[in-house]
Amino acid sequence: MINSLPDDTRQAMEADAFRQLLAHLDANKDVQNIDLMILADFCRNCLSKWLVAAGERQGVSIDYDTAREYVYGMPYSQWKSLYQADATPEQLNALDARQQQRNRTDS
C-alpha cells in the first residue's frame, strides 16, 4: 500500500515519521545511546550519519556536527554534558555481546 503511493506523498509521510522519531527521542532523553545500540543496533549518532549520507545522495553537503545538532536539538557537547550518563559495565558487556552477535551473522 505505502509503496504504491505517489513518491511525494510517501516521502512526506517518511519525513513526518522521522520528525516524530526525533521528537520522541528528544522527549525521552533518559534513553541512552548505548541502550539504543544494545536493543536496536542504532543510536542518535547513527541517525546523524544517515542524515549526512541522505544529504549526499541529494547533492547536499551537511557536516556531521550540523547533522548531530539537528538530531539532538542542541550541540552534541551540550546534550552529552546534560543527558549522557557514563556507561555501566553491564551496558558495555551487553553492547559487546550485541556487536559480536552481529559480526557472527554478517560473516
Image (spheres, helix red, strand yellow):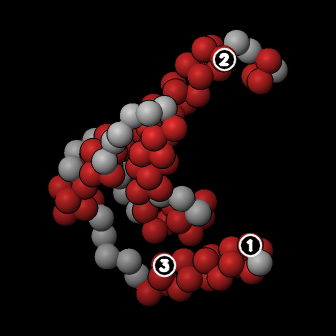
Label 2 residue SS: helix
Tag 3: amino acid = Gln
- Nearer to the camera, 98 or 27: 98
The residue located at (54%, 59%) in the rendering is 42
Q: Quadrant of residue 73?
A: top left
| Number of the label disc, if any, that sits on residue 91 | 3
- N-term-proximal mark, 2 vs 3: 2
Tag nearer the camera, 1 or 3: 1
The residue located at (77%, 78%) in the rendering is 107
| Number of the label disc, if any, that sits on residue 83 | none
The residue labelled by disc 2 is 7
Label 1 residue SS: helix
Tag 1: amino acid = Asp
47, above or below 100, in the image: above
x, y percentage for residue 97? 62, 82
Tag 2: amino acid = Asp
**Dots 1, 3 in contact, CB < 8 A:** no
Q: Residues within 10 Å of mark 1 (few under 14, many from 20)?
A: few
